[in-house]
Image (cartoon, helix red, strand yellow):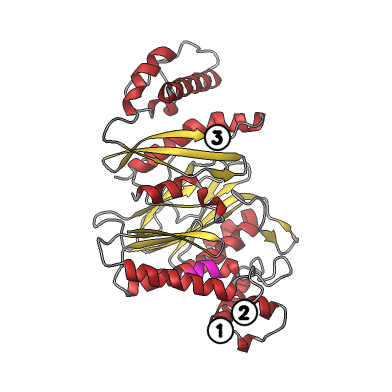
Amino acid sequence: MRHVEHAMGTVFSFDVRHPHGTGQAVAEAVAWLHRVDGIFSTYRPDSPVSRLDRGEIGLADCPPEVADILDLCDSVAEISHGYFTVRPWGRLELSAMVKGWAIEQASLILTRSGAVNHCVNGGGDLQLTGTAAPDRPWRVGIAHPLRPGDLATVVAGCDLAVATSGTAERGPHILDPHTGRPATELASITLVGESLTMIDAYATAAFAMGGAARMWVERLEGVEAFAVTASGGTWCTSGFGGEGEAAAEFRRGAKTRP
Amino acid sequence: MRRVILAVLVTTVGLVLLLSFKPHEITASADPPSAVSQNGSGSAGNTDASAGSTKNTGSSATSGDKVVTGDAADTRWGPVQVELVLSGGKVTNIKVLQAPDGNNRDIEINNQALPILKEEALSAQSAQIDTVSGATYTSDGYTQSLQSALDKAGL
C-alpha cells in the first residue's frame, strides 16, 4: 500500500510491499511522525524544543526524546569535526538530526508490526527494509541536483538508508560552521548506509565539508557517498560502486543490472 | 498534436547535438545521440523531422494506457511538470508538460535536460525505480514531480 503524509514541513511517502493488513501499522507510524513534530517543531512556539531554546523550561522538563537527540547531535558533531552543529543559525535547530531519526523509527514501527518490506521516504531521505519484490531489491533513483527531474545515479539494495543533502530546491542553506558561510562546493551529496538517523546527519555534515567529505566518508565504516559538484562533476567513495548492500549502478557509461 | 511536437522537438534537439558533437559531419544522420534512440519506436536514425513525427507516435498513449500527471515542481529554474504514460504497470512514455523557459540560461538547460530527462526517466523505469532520494524538499515542493508521480501511480 501507499500512503502520503504531510508532516514536519515536508512530505512522507510510505510504500509497504505487503498485500493487506498494514493499514494499522502505517497509521501508527504516521501518528509517531506527528508526535515528533509536536516535540521538535521550531515553528510552534509552544513546542518543548521552542520553550527549551527560550530558556523557559529545562532539559529535564522535556520529553526524554529531546535528550536522546541532543546526545546524538553531540556524537555526530564530534565525528564530523564540528561540521555538524545544532545551532547553525544561532537558534536551536535539531531538524537535521530529527528527521532521519523519525523516519528510521517509523520504519521500525512497520517492521515490528510484521510489514518488513517497506520504504519510508521523508522529503527525499529514506529508510528501506526487506525487498521491493521477492526477487528484487529496492532501487532508489538519486535526483540530479542540477537537472530537475533527471537522475544522477541509481542505488540498489535491501535494508538501506539513503540521504541526500544539497541545494536543489532551497538554494544554499547549509552553513559551513567553520566559516559561517553557506557551503557551495557541492551541488548535492548522497550518503548510503544502514541507519538513517546517522546517515541523514552525516549527509548534512558532509555537504558542509564539500570536497573534503570524500576522505571523511572513506573512513566511516559502512557508509558510502556519491556527490555532484557545483560544476556538475561527480565523485564517489570506493565502496559505492561495489557489491553488497551499498551496491550502486551508474546510469552513464555502465551497464544496468537486470 | 502534442506527440507530434514532442517528436519534432526530440528530433530537432538530436540534430543540434549531432551538429555540436560533429561539426564537420553534418550528413552523419545515421549516428544519432542516445536521446533520440530512446524515443523507442525504431525510427531513431531518421533525422527527417516530418518522418520522425509520424513514426515516433508508437510510444505515445493508446487505449488501455493510463496517464498520470505529476504535480508541478517549483524548482530553482522554474516550474517543471511531467506526465507518465503507463501500460501494464510500466512507464512507456514521459511527456514534459512544463519546463522553465524564462531566460537564455533556462533555455540552455532545457535543451540539455529535457531529452536527458526523457532518456533517464525511461531507462530508470525500465530498471524499476521504486523511490527517489534528493535534497530536502518542503511540503510545497513535494511537487518534485517524479516522486509525486510515482506515489500517484502506485508503482
User: Tag 2: Cα neighbours inside 10 Å, few (<14), some, or many (≥20)?
Assistant: many
**Disc ID at residue B103:** none
**Which quarter of the figure is the N terminus of chain A placed in?**
bottom left
Residue at the spot of label 2: A48
Magenta stretch?
A: A98-102
Measuring from the top left, give residue A181's x and y in whole percent.
74, 57
Mark 3–mark 1 distance (CA, rounded to whole Å): 46 Å
Mark 1–mark 2 distance (CA, rounded to whole Å): 8 Å
**B95 sits to left or right of A91:** left
- Residue placed most toward the observer, B132 or A155: B132
Q: Hey, which quadrant is residue A25 in on the image?
A: bottom left
- Residue placed most toward the observer, A181 or A66: A66
Q: Amino acid at mark 2?
A: Pro
Q: The residue marked by circle 1 belongs to what chain?
A: A
Measuring from the top left, give residue A70's x and y in whole percent.
60, 78
Q: Dot 1 lies on which element?
A: loop
Q: Hey, which quadrant is residue A14 in on the image?
A: bottom left
Whether residue A21 is visible, yes or no, is: yes
**Which quarter of the figure is the C terminus of chain A placed in?**
top left
Residue at the spot of label 1: A63
User: Tag 3: Cα neighbours inside 10 Å, few (<14), some, or many (≥20)?
Assistant: many
Residue at the spot of label 3: B99
Measuring from the top left, give residue A21's x and y in whole percent.
26, 67
